[in-house]
Amino acid sequence: ALASIVGLMIHAVADGIAMGASVASADASLTWIVFAALMIHKAPASFGLCSVLLARRLHRTDIRKAVAIFSLCTPFGAVLTYLILSLFFRVTQIVVAGSDPAAAMMEGVQSIAGTTSSAVSGIYIGAALTFSGGTFLYVVMHAL
């Protein structure tokens, strides 16, 4: 039972990594796709965890604790991934408006005011999503 619990918790953290990476990206459609995928499969994963724990005849209090910890793993992974990507891998995109000094100065003012766009580089989003996918495969093949 312990291997199943730990495996599903690692799986839930990997869900959070995917969610945090998709939110940190500038692509709203990626965020919605990952969100929908997580919502569709979260109920069966929770049902599976409860089924395994009930089959082991664990006390109801222990089952509630395990499910509570399991349910916190995804938000923990999402927030941690988002913070890491946003704090350390954010790329600010400053567009210089040709050779017009007034336009360039205006871009600088907008940059200081926080109106330029910034997002996490796609390389880091891809790396986080790949890590999350690899973790899924590992847990499915070895831990469960």
Image (cartoon, helix red, strand yellow):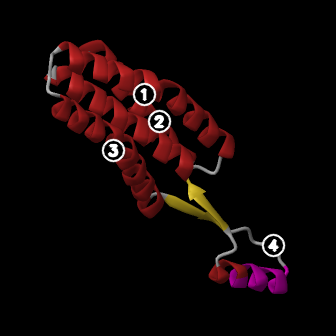
Image coords of residue 94 (percent x, y): 68, 69
x%, y% of residue 141?
Answer: 30, 13
Residue drawn 64% across and 77% down? Answer: 114
| Distance (Cα) linking label 1 and label 3 | 20 Å
Residue annotated with mark 4:
97
Above/below status of 60 relative to 103: above
Select label 4 or label 1 by which is in front: 1
- Nearer-the-camera pick, 140 or 98: 140
Report the amino acid beneath label 3: Leu
Marks 4 and 1 close (CB-CB < 8 Å): no
Cα separation, mark 2 vs mark 4, equals: 34 Å
Q: Are marks 2 and 1 in contact (CB under 8 Å)?
A: yes
The magenta-colored residue range is 100-109
Using the numbered discs, state the Cα–Cα distance from disc 4 to disc 3 in whole angstroms: 46 Å
Quadrant where the C terminus is found in the figure: top left
Q: Which residue is mark 3?
A: 72
Marks 2 and 3, the one that precedes in the sequence: 3
Q: Position of residue 9 (x, y in %)?
A: 28, 33
Magenta-span inclusion, residue 106: yes
The image's mark for residue 129 is: 2
User: Circle 2: is it few (<14), some (14-19), or many (20+) Cα within 10 Å?
Assistant: many
Q: Is residue 86 above or below residue 44?
A: below
**Among numbered discs 1 and 3, the one appearing first in the sequence:** 3
Q: Amino acid at mark 4?
A: Ala
Label 2 to label 1: alpha-carbon separation: 6 Å
Disc nearest the viewer among 4 and 3: 3
Tag of residue 91: none
